[in-house]
Structures are given as C-alpha cells and as structure tokens.
Image (spheres, rainbow, N blue to C red):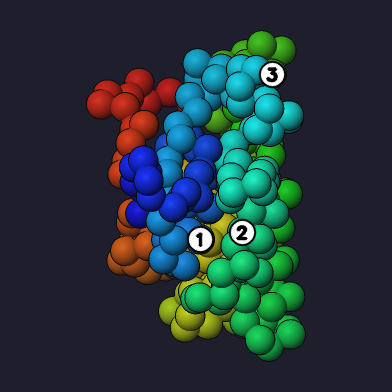
C-alpha cells in the first residue's frame, strides 16, 4: 500500500522507487506481503534523478530502491528485503526447511545477480552508445533466457502453486518482477519456460503483487513510448 504520511502521524517507512524498476518492484511486493504501510518517493531514472545530490545522500551508488526506516537507511533490494524479514516477521518470506530456504536464496540470486544487472539502464545505455540501439533487445533476451533456463531446472522439483511450494516466499518476490518485465518490456517468448509462465499467471492473482505492479504506482506515466 502506497500512501503519503500526514503531519503528526508516526513516521512511515519511506521507499525511494521507480515504477518500472524490477528491483523496486521486489521491495514493493515484500512490503505488501508483510502488510506494511509506506510513503512512496518517486525517483525518475530517465530524468537522471538518481544522480541528484539529494538522492546520492540516500544511496551513494545512485540506484533504486532505497528504504528509510527512522534513522536506518538501506539500499539494494536484497538487503532491504532481508531487513524487512528480520524486523517484521509477519508473513515470513523464508521457509523453515533448510533445503527449501536454500533454493529460495538461489533462485533470488539468479534473478538479482545473474539476470537483472545485465538489463539495467546503465548497461543498456552503454550498449546503445557502443554498439547501437538495435543491439539492446537481443542482448537482454539472450541473458534473460539463460537465467530462465537455469530457473526452470532449479525449480522443477520444488514448485507447487508457487516457486517452492504452495506458499509465497522469497523466490516468488524476486521472480514475479523479472518475469513480468521480461514479457511486458522485453517481449520475451515464454514458450520455452512453461513453469515460469505458470508462476506468472499465479502471481497476477495475488493482491500484494497486483498492488506492486508498475502501472499501479503513483509515478506511472499517463502515456509511454514503449521503448526499451
């Protein structure tokens, strides 16, 4: 749930986010699953607001998301989600079973370390400048497909209704934004990834995921160019 705090109210969590950022999307899902109210602070990546002096005081590397909880300032979606898991145990994002927990960590890391960094804005700008704009989409689709192939193999013996069973856990929090963006933004053909395609449909039915969707964020533009 995204709201603005009013004077006199206890200070809410503040999330610095960009509607299309899959890393921000993960944190929005985690906040929603845990039932946490927060203030949405939009950072327009296309306008370069992430490099403003004000935002660099929040996160010196200039990436979203960032979370402010009182005097605590955190950046990096994995660190933020783990912090939320420790501080707010409602709706745990990690199972008790050690093997299942490890699978969740592995799936989340495939997304956050082996797929998403290769499709972020800085990388795509560099490819456009050094190679050409037509090289961006094939690059992204190649690396997403590599990661999705690994995820299909990893999860095939663990998935239930969701990635590692019939409850939503950490893997789902990371998978949902990546699959959504791969389809909607990067036009990835999901035919080769039936398990992930099925999970995508399941995520679309969950209110915590629906509320976190890019089109439901306050900074979602009225009209989009549709460019990568």
In this figure, which residue is indicated by the disc labeled 1?
30
Measure the C-alpha gap from mark 2 to mark 1. Answer: 7 Å
Marks 3 and 1: CB-CB under 8 Å?
A: no
Image quadrant in which you'd find residue 123: top right
Q: Is residue 8 visible?
A: yes
Mark 3 or 1 closer to N-term?
1
Q: Secondary structure at mark 1?
A: helix
User: Which of 45 and 160 lies nearest the eye of the viewer?
Assistant: 45
Measure the C-alpha gap from mark 3 to mark 2. Answer: 29 Å
Within-10-Å neighbours for mark 2: few <14, some 14–19, many 20+: many
Residue found 66% across the figure and 62% down from its top: 82
Of tags 3 and 1, the one toward the viewer is 1
Mark 2 or 1 closer to N-term?
1
Measure the C-alpha gap from mark 3 to mark 1. Answer: 31 Å
Residue 86, given in percent of the width and then of the height, sits at: 65, 69
Mark 3 or 2 closer to N-term?
2
In the picture, which quadrant includes the N terminus? bottom left
User: Which of 42 and 100 lies nearest the eye of the viewer?
Assistant: 42
Residue found 73% across the figure and 75% down from its top: 102
In this figure, which residue is indicated by the disc labeled 3?
126
Residue found 34% across the figure and 42% down from its top: 6
In this figure, which residue is indicated by the disc labeled 2?
81
Q: Secondary structure at mark 3?
A: helix
Residue found 62% across the figure and 76% down from its top: 94
């Amino acid at each position: 749930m995204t709201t603005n705090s009013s004077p006199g109210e206890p200070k809410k969590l503040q999330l610095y986010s960009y509607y299309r950022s899959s890393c921000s999307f993960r944190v929005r899902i985690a906040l929603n699953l845990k039932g946490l109210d927060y203030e949405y602070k939009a950072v327009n990546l296309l306008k370069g607001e992430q490099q403003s002096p004000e935002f660099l005081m929040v996160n010196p590397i200039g990436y979203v998301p960032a979370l402010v909880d009182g005097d605590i300032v955190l950046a990096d979606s994995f660190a933020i989600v783990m912090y939320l898991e420790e501080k707010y145990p409602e709706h745990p994002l990690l199972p008790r079973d050690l093997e299942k927990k490890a699978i969740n960590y592995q799936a989340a890391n495939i997304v956050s370390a082996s797929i998403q960094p290769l499709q972020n804005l800085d990388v795509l700008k560099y490819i456009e400048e050094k190679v050409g704009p037509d090289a961006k989409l094939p690059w992204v689709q190649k690396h997403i497909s590599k990661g999705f192939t690994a995820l299909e193999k990893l999860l095939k013996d663990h998935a239930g209704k969701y990635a590692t069973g019939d409850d939503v856990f950490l893997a789902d929090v990371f998978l949902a934004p990546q699959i959504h963006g791969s389809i909607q933004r990067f036009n990835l053909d999901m035919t080769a990834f039936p398990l992930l395609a099925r999970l995508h449909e399941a995520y679309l039915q969950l209110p915590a995921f629906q509320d976190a969707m890019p089109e439901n964020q306050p900074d979602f533009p009225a009209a989009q160019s549709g460019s990568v």
